[in-house]
Amino acid sequence: MDIIVTIKQVPDPEAPKESFRIDEEAKRILNPANVDPVINGYDENAIEAALQLKEAVGGKVTALCMGEESATRALKQALAMGVDEAILLHDPAFADADATATAYVLAAAIRKLGKYDLILCGRQASDWDQAQVPSGIAEYLDLPSVTAVQKVEVRDGTVRVERILEDGYEVIELPMPCLVTVSNEANRPRYPTLKGIMAAGKKQIPVWNAAALEVDPARVGRAGSLTRVVKLYIPRFEGSCEFIEGETPEEMGEKLALRLRELKII
Amino acid sequence: MTQGVMVFAETTGGTLASIAKELLGAGRKLADALGEPLLAAVLGHGVQEAAQEAVYHGADTVYVADAPVLETYQTASYTAVMAQIVAQAQPSILLIGMSDNGRDLAPRLAFRLGTGLASDCVDLAINPETKLLEATRPVSGGNAMATVVIEKTRPQMATVRAKTMEPAVRDPSRQGTLVPVEVTLDPATLPARVIERVKAKAEGVRLEDAEIVIAGGRGLKGPEDFYALLEPCAKLLGGAVGASRAAVDEGWVPTQMQIGLTGKIISPKLYIACAISGAAQHMAGCGYAKTIVAINRDPDAPIFQRAHLGVVGDYKKVIPAFHKKCEELLKK
Ligand SMILES: Cc1cc2nc3c(=O)[nH]c(=O)nc-3n(C[C@H](O)[C@H](O)[C@H](O)COP(=O)(O)OP(=O)(O)OC[C@H]3O[C@@H](n4cnc5c(N)ncnc54)[C@H](O)[C@@H]3O)c2cc1C
């Protein structure tokens, strides 16, 4: 079975809150100083799901990432986790792409790869939180899709997933090829082993640019974007917390109840 | 020329879902700002009454696709029928709720229509000069806010976060037109098959509806205190128990209890966060609570920047004393 996983390199969401930075002028989310970027968390879940499927039924896993040259870092890590092949989609013309322009490039790369049974993506990227690109890839490739699943299995040539719902989940069967987006409930991504890291170090990561992908220059990057960010800012919250004082935590607990009663909340 | 603000009005059990009323409320304001009609799309099986309700909640025209094939949501069927309705109605704006189905439908539909989409918006406005929709959405889990416009394509699409818009007020004297939509989809051509729907075990008050929510985070260090401390206290106050994603990821509590960006969005009267640090992604789900109480050992925890009342201390000691005092107060 041929599985393709799309991944994105993002600023580490676990970095200290104070280190969060944006460029208001350029409308970009920046990587915090001294904190290395990471593979988007849900994409790690997608990689893990792909590797488990490969272990169960055999096949090959290919990771695709559109990004700056520095995103080879994320692809190296994917290789270290056990992905068979990794390709970087990079071209200066791809910069500042919105979901539409990103899905267009990823779909072009998947077409170029040609052979695939299942495409796995993370349910959303933790920088822009759009959750659009996977559905876009599916639409461009005319594939059935299901988003935000907590389980993905392959049985007798069909893909069986559990789509998360507010009050439970839904079991859905899809024919192959298809596209599925994975949520964090699905698994715990493995850590790369030392052997994996060594092997990844030796692997080449091909770079496909606009010419290699034979894409329409008007449909990539900023030129191909349909949405435009006109304002980006950090919200400020009034720090007006009333602290309950007390000698002991028990006393504070009692005073909290009294205060809430006084405010007629309980 | 495209004209009108359309909302995808979801139904549950044959009636309008709360998110639909919120969208109708928000859509009405945008339509009035533009001087354009408010349109609604109602899809399902046996949804005539819900369509009429959409009129009572502010829609001028309701496109009703009522067919057995639309009984349960499927990406392919709903995308196809919505694309058909948009082609027929030609709205300039299309709003969809950030619900289980809306979050799946909206991006697929945007790509089908070849238009832009702003996801998970919390504020919508019409720019008085350009007349463009300005959709504001949290990014990086809420650490920043972005205002997005869609200039070249129509409809301008946005998904809207639950509980961020004032719901429309029902007025049964309102008049509107119902337009039946012909559904020619053959169920046999749908690629996916929904095998079953599994409901998570649920007892007591629903987290989304609870007036009082007590939530626990990573600091609880295991499932025990959720059930031994938080649950009895929530029960006493007639509330429900929630959790941070850290607690869900650890496997201590089921995913249905997660509050936040990728969990439930709640707006209770009172939210008590125990041993939760207050990450933006968590606050995305509870920031609309009327009163936020934080109990945290660390006086510098970011949650105190968002809390109205704070206790710096160990929840293990604070909660039992709080519980006992509440019991006393409630007896009086
Ligand atoms: C894309 C994305 C989506 C996300 N979605 C969500 C979401 O929907 N919901 C969500 O919650 N998170 C979400 N997160 C995760 C979020 O960023 C945080 O990692 C998470 O909320 C942290 O949970 P926590 O506060 O329980 O744990 P921590 O951040 O580890 O905080 C634990 C706190 O407990 C305190 N503490 C420890 N022991 C005690 C004690 N005995 N008494 C009192 N205080 C104590 C500590 O001081 C600390 O402040 C998401 C992250 C990403 C990247």
Image (spheres, coloured by chain):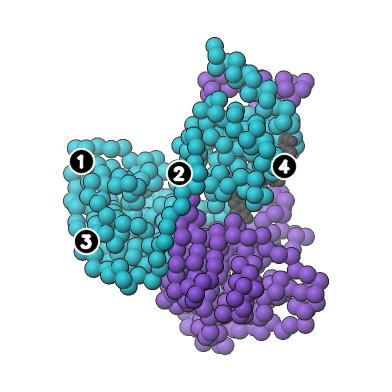
The residues tagged by marks 2 and 1 sit, at their Cα atoms, a distance apart of 25 Å
| Label 2, ligand 1: CB separation under 8 Å | no
Q: Which residue corresponds to mark 4?
A: B221
| Image coordinates for residue B46, horizontal then vertical, percent | 25, 51
On whether disc 3 and disc 2 are found on a single subunit, the reply is: yes
Which mark is on residue B174? 1
On the image, which quarter does residue A60 sit in?
A: bottom right
Q: Chain of mark 4?
A: B
Q: Nearer the viewer, residue A138 or B124?
A: A138
Q: Chain of mark 2?
A: B
Residue at 76% across, 74% down: A196
| Label 4, ligand 1: CB separation under 8 Å | yes
On the image, which quarter does residue B85 sit in?
A: bottom left
Which mark is on residue B181? 3
- Element type at marker 1? loop
Residue B296 visible from this viewpoint: yes
Q: Which residue corresponds to mark 2?
A: B164
Mark 3: few, some, or many residues within 10 Å (few <14, many ≥20)? Answer: some
Image position of B41 (left or right of B140): left
Q: Amino acid at mark 1?
A: Arg
Image position of B4 (left or right of B18): left
